[in-house]
Image (cartoon, rainbow, N blue to C red):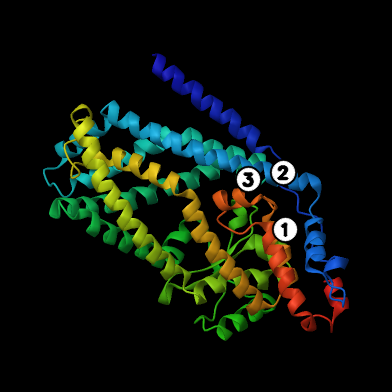
Amino acid sequence: MPGISRTIIVWALIAVAALSASAQPAIQPTADITKVPAAARPSPQFDAEAATEAYMAMMPPEAVARSNAYFEGGYWLILWDFLYGAAISLVLLNLRWSARMRDLAVRITRFRWLQPLLYGVQYVIVTAVIGFPLEFYENYVREHKYGLATQSFGPWMGDEFKSLLVSLVISSIAMMVLFAIVRKFPRTWWIWGAVASMGLLTILIAIGPVFLQPIFNTPKKLDNPKITAPILRMAHANGIPTNDVWEIDASRQTTRMSANVSGFGNTMRITLNDNLIQRGSPEEIQAVMGHEMGHYVMNHIPKSLMFLLILDVLSFAYLFWGIRWAIGRSGARWEVSSASDPAVVPLVTLLAGILFFVLTPINNTFTRVQEKEADMFGLNAARQPDGFAQAAIHLGEYRKMRPGPIEEFVFFDHPSGYNRIHSAMIWKSQNLELFEKAPVQQAAH
């Protein structure tokens, strides 16, 4: 019974790691950042560089070292995620597990259109089990080590199980649709597959706030006029059609602060997580929401979908030729006959993983440019540069604040904390008349 013994040992080690991880202390809040530092207060001698450095100095050295270590560790995780995922795909292909899963789907049903769905269920479960050790380390052990997680092992596993069920449904339906397209259009499936995948993604974005988010968190309408009134005034001034602000209980999982404007049409929602409400000053909340509204007003979701459509078409063309070449070379050994064979899925995952690993700087740059645009919109909409600086420092609890230029280009999908504070202080230096009337209030919120 050596296999059972190894399994028991692995799960025992996971249980020990879970207990030790959950015993880590929660992250300590950054030092009081609601008081504007002297160098950042409005005066005829105001200097954006000095103001930026004054805000940067509000992070204690140990907090800087911790966030640097956490974020730089993420660089390695990009590599390990890619290599681990590639290894899983190669195991499924070379041991012919993928072919066996396809054979099982064929035995269960003679309906060819249903076979990819049944294969998809098996594939999601098998890859989740094989990938669990890295998932456990990355999203449980490591998050607790740096004080960013609040869940004990049981509730965390509950959310992991929910994620698995959601993946089962979405992935299985997607496979059924895409393989039907491959069978219907054997020469041009790469075009229609790209269009169909973007259609599925658009549907997920639209239903996310109403149907997917409540699976993991409880959304409720925020009923605090001190918070909602400035947000709704800003929303209406910028043409955002909503009369409600929503709150989610993210603190049950994480200490991270966040907000978003999500969905389409009737599903559009302005949402803050409770960490932002509890820890953020009114100025910080308004600054963050101004940024999030910028994404909506500047049509970043449609623009992102257009970018992804172009990327999708190119990616599917790459898959079309890559699958043909790989099957011609090793298809017999893998027992994979063609692109319409469900057993090809690990090969698709492998090829896609290689492509998107290489495209990491390009994808990050596209997102970072949009985030910069939303930053500038938020500064002009909320007019809270100090709140914006406070938000950058809070985000600096898990994002490196001062990277090198190449480091930021390759690994950052948002502007660095330093650059965001600097942009806010440049904006403040150009609008000092808005703050010179009330220097006392700015000095002591």
Q: Which residue of the protein is positioned furthest toward the top in this rendering?
A: 1
Check disc 3: other Cα within 10 Å, few if <14, some if 14-19, many if 20+. Answer: some
Q: Which residue is drawn at 31% across and 31% down?
A: 92
* SS for callout 2: helix
Position of 415 relative to 227 (above/below): above
Query: Which residue in the protein does label 1 denote?
Result: 393
Label 1 packing within 10 angstroms: few (<14), some (14-19), many (20+): many
Specify whether residue 246 is in view.
no
Please identify the quadrant where the C terminus is shown. Answer: bottom right
Residue highlighted by disc 3: 71
- The residue lying toward the viewer, choosing from 160 and 230, is 230
Contact? badges 2 and 3 (CB < 8 Å): no
Looking at the image, is 300 positioned above or below residue 198? below
Going from N to C along the chain, the mark reached first, 1 or 2, is: 2
Which of the 4 image quarters holds residue 247?
A: bottom right
Residue 372 image-quadrant placement: bottom right
**Mark 1 to mark 3 CA distance (whole Å):** 14 Å
Q: Distance between the residues labelled 2 and 3?
A: 9 Å
Q: Is residue 434 above or below residue 271?
A: below
Q: Is residue 37 left or right of residue 74?
A: right
At horizontal 71% and vertical 74% (from top left) the residue drawn is: 427
Assess whether mark 3 and mark 1 are in contact (beta carbons under 8 angstroms): no
**Residue 207 at x, y = what percent?**
39, 65
Q: Looking at the picture, tell me which residue is in the foreground, 326 or 89.
A: 326
| Count of marks, rendered view | 3
What amino acid does circle 1 point to?
Ile
Task: Say whether residue 332 is left or right of residue 312.
Answer: left
Label 2 sits on residue: 66
Residue 65 numbered mark, or none: none
Q: Which quadrant of the rendered structure holds the N terminus?
A: top left
**Mark 3 residue type:** Phe
